[in-house]
Image (tube, rainbow, N blue to C red):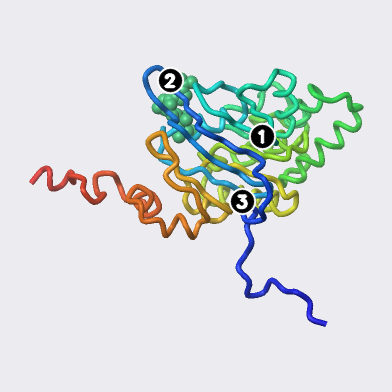
Amino acid sequence: MNEPTLAGAERRYPHETGAKPVISVRGLRVRYGDREVLDGVDLDIYRGETMVILGASGCGKSTLLRHLEGLEKPEAGSICIHGTDIVTASRKEMERVRRLLGVSFQSAAMFNSMTVGDNVALPLREHTDLAESTIRLITRMKLQQVGLSGVENLYPTELSGGMRKRASLARALAMDPEILLFDEPSAGLDPIIAAGIDRLILRLKDAFKMTLIVVTHELQSAFLIADRMCMLDQAKILAVGTVKQILANPHPRIQQFVQRIADDAAPGSQSYVTGFE
Ligand SMILES: Nc1ncnc2c1ncn2[C@@H]1O[C@H](COP(=O)(O)OP(=O)(O)O)[C@@H](O)[C@H]1O
Ligand SMILES: [Mg+2]
């Protein structure tokens, strides 16, 4: 009997399954003072996909993530997560949606006065009535999942940068989130430790079929982990697509970014060197 096989077939991405998006952003506008940071952002994210948000420093990537988490209210637009618009949701609805989200941001640092174990256990203590023994067990499991064992009783300052990053990820996973938001997971880590974080992200994606939204400007990492990527530039999303599609996108800003061409060396710009001649 002929078994159906995927060999030779093009890989099917989560956004191609015909399912409804888990997160749907429409017309998102964010302004700080007179600076328009996001100007009409539309983005759909599908269950089980890893969406990487690319863009130059200061282009609004973290701002977009903070709005997805519901930490700030935009000037206009909607952000539907599982059909609930978190821009207009009541506090109660908002809390329900937040339970689906795990967040690992640079700002969500570990508390240095608490042990690593207590840091990871914090969301469980805050949001559940689980018995202490169960909380300890889950904490140990979550630390194991990120490749950290036996560090529960250490303090965050006793861990290396890469280990702290893993521990904060364990905390983000504590409540078994369905969607994980990740801001610059490998920022400040050396390339080998950063590669370890990428592998960990790939494992989470495969083992738990999580929906991951990852902000990064590390291209190598983006190409490795992304199902799709979007590129933010000057307050707008320039393009959304698979790695292949983005690499082939002829938009000059996208090509400049993926080929790592400096602004002053980009076609049409005045080079510093010629400027001096
Ligand atoms: N809370 C805020 N208040 C005022 N300006 C902000 C705030 N957050 C971000 N910005 C500004 O918005 C722009 C985008 O910031 P951010 O989203 O952090 O960029 P990225 O993460 O892409 O580097 C920057 O110019 C930043 O200074
Ligand atoms: Mg940022």
Marks 3 and 2 in Cβ contact (< 8 Å): no
Rendered position, 194 above or below 104 = below
Label 3 environment density (alpha carbons within 10 Å; few <14, some 14–19, many ≥20): some
Name the image quarter holding residue 111.
Answer: top right
Residue 174 left/right relative to 132: left
Q: Would you name the residue on which mark 1 appears? A: 81
Q: Residue furthest bottom?
A: 1
Q: In terms of depth relative to the viewer, which is nearer, 48 or 87?
A: 87
Does ligand 1 reach within 8 Å of label 2's beta carbon?
Answer: yes
Tell me the SS state at disc 1. Answer: strand
User: Which residue position is annotated with label 3?
Assistant: 196
Instruction: Return the x and y of residue 190 as percentages of the image width and height.
Output: 52, 46
Work out whether 32 lies above or below 155.
above
Q: What whole-number distance in Å separates the C-alpha atoms at marks 3 and 2?
A: 36 Å
- The residue lying toward the viewer, choosing from 150 and 23, is 23
Q: Mark 2 points at which residue?
A: 32
Residue appearing at x 43%, y 20% in the figure:
32
Q: Residue flagged by tag 3: what amino acid is it?
A: Gly
Residue at 70% x, 49% y: name it. 204
Q: Report whether the residue tagged 3 is closer than 8 Å to ligand 2.
A: no
Q: How far is disc 1 from disc 2 in space, using C-alphas? A: 24 Å
Mark 1 vs mark 2: in front:
1
Q: Is mark 3 on a helix, strand or loop?
A: helix
